[in-house]
Image (tube, rainbow, N blue to C red):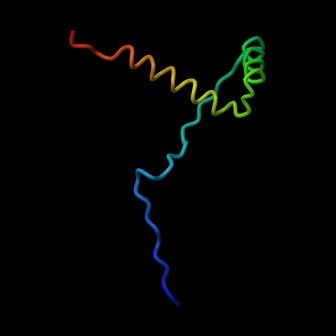
Amino acid sequence: MANKKKKIEPAALKKPTRTHRQTLMFNDMEMSVIMNFCCRYKITKKTKFFRETIISTILQKMEEDHPTLF
């Protein structure tokens, strides 16, 4: 029997796993707005939408608040 070599992927090529769970709760009006938005713009994956929206907002804010020399 021939031994199969394991393919070792460099860390940069591995997809990060999501291990930190956070929970959001919305009231009826907020959920209605979210559902209308998702229907209007044909967003089917709300989890991805929330993740991208939150991270992009954080990155924009960090970019605005970066220290300047002048």
- 55 and 25: which is toward the camera: 55
Residue under the image location 51 percent in, 49 percent down: 15
Residue 29, given in percent of the width and then of the height, sits at: 76, 11
Above-or-below relation of 34 to 23 = above
Q: How many labels sit on residues?
A: 0
- Outermost residue on the bottom side: it is 1
Q: Which image quadrant is residue 64 in? A: top left
- 21 and 64: which is toward the camera: 64
- Outermost residue on the top side: it is 70
Q: Which image quadrant is residue 9 in? A: bottom left
On the rendered structure, is 64 left or right of 48?
A: left
In the picture, the quarter occupied by the C terminus is top left
- Outermost residue on the left side: it is 69
Above-or-below relation of 57 to 44 = above
Above-or-below relation of 9 to 28 = below
Residue under the image location 77 percent in, 18 percent down: 36
Residue 19, given in percent of the width and then of the height, sits at: 54, 42
Residue 41, given in percent of the width and then of the height, sits at: 72, 23
Residue under the image location 72 percent in, 29 percent down: 43
- 32 and 56: which is toward the camera: 56
On the rendered structure, is 59 left or right of 68?
A: right
Residue 27, given in percent of the width and then of the height, sits at: 74, 14
Q: Which image quadrant is residue 37 in? A: top right
Residue under the image location 64 percent in, 29 percent down: 49
